[in-house]
Amino acid sequence: MKPQFVTLEGVEGAGKSTQKAAICAWLSARGVSFVETREPGGTPLAESIRTLLLHTEADPPTALTELLLMFAARAQHLETRIQTALNAGHWVICDRFTDATFAYQGGGRGCSWSWIETLETLVQGSLRPDTTIVFDVPVDIGLSRAASRGHADRIEREDHAFFERVRRAYQRRADAEPQRFVMIDGSPPAEQVTATLLTTLAIRWRL
Ligand code: T5A
């Protein structure tokens, strides 16, 4: 199998980071070489853009600025880290990618879906994730988990309706590409989510 580009998605507090650690441990035990990364971020410049995006309080980005900054960070991350890793034969396990842009800037903020598609093609060419895992949880559950970690960033402070639109946009993406997407119920206890996830991935990847 060629090196897989795997992305993890979901609303705030869906359990992506928790389950990313489980996937990485599981891949390591099977001798799969991988790079673990995240968006926005993943390189020093892209991490600086992340800070601008999540922690600018005085002059917050407009919806269009936010969209362009997400893709600016992605362009840097893709060329200098993701593509390099895939070319060298490593899998890439990435916490959020362009489906988050469709969900948050498209669904949440109401940016045009076709603008996002245009930027996706400009920045990524034909590259798309091989597998996208969405951890689906009711918004209330996700937000209460995220809140338990303390200080909320600029996007986490959006209202409930925003995250309902985000959740619906993920569902729309998954419905459009059922082969790429794996939908996992993220509501049960973490160990139970891990067990379901790894069983599903073992079948999908024959590992
Ligand atoms: N963004 C990102 C965009 O708007 N557009 C884009 O294009 C991109 C790429 C940063 C923000 O950027 C936005 C979306 C985000 O607002 P992020 O760093 O992924 O993205 O931030 P968060 O989604 O906020 O990440 P979180 O860490 O909140 O969520 P996770 O990773 O889904 O959740 P996790 O695993 O850290 O768990 C949260 C808490 O819940 C517990 C954990 O122990 C932890 O305390 N937990 C569970 N508790 C009970 N049962 C379970 N099954 C649990 N799983 C985890």
Image (tube, helix red, strand yellow):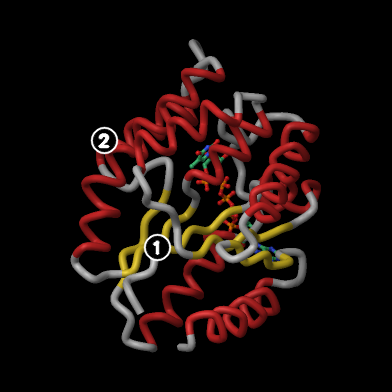
Q: Which of marks 2 and 1 is in front?
A: 1
In the drawing, does residue 90 fall left or right of residue 116? left
Q: For the residue marked with disc 2, what is the amino acid? A: Leu
Instruction: Name the residue rendered at 40%, 34% in the picture.
Output: 50
The residue lying toward the viewer, choosing from 67 and 60, is 67
The residue lying toward the viewer, choosing from 131 and 114, is 114
Instruction: Name the residue rendered at 70%, 53% in the picture.
Output: 145
Instruction: Name the residue rendered at 50%, 12% in the picture.
Output: 58
Location of residue 104 with respect to 138 vertically, above or below: above
Does the numbered disc 1 mark a residue whose Cβ is under 8 Å from ligand 1? no
- Asked where in the image residue 187 lies, by quadrant, the reply is bottom right
The residue lying toward the viewer, choosing from 170 and 10, is 170
Viewport quadrant of the N terminus: bottom left
Per the image, label 2 sits on a secondary structure element best described as: helix
Instruction: Name the residue rendered at 54%, 15% in the picture.
Output: 62
Location of residue 186 with respect to 42 vertically, above or below: below
All told, the count of numbered labels is 2
Residue located beneath label 1 in the image: 5
Image coordinates for residue 175, horizontal then vertical, percent: 70, 55
Location of residue 100 with respect to 196 vertically, above or below: above
Most extreme residue toward the top is 59
Q: For the residue marked with disc 1, what is the amino acid? A: Phe
Q: Say which label, 2 or 1, has the lower sequence index.
A: 1
Q: Distance between the residues labelled 2 and 1?
A: 21 Å
In the drawing, does residue 77 fall left or right of residue 134? left
Image coordinates for residue 148, horizontal then vertical, percent: 67, 50
Image coordinates for residue 200, horizontal then vertical, percent: 61, 80
Q: Which mark is residue 45?
A: 2
Image coordinates for residue 178, horizontal then vertical, percent: 64, 62
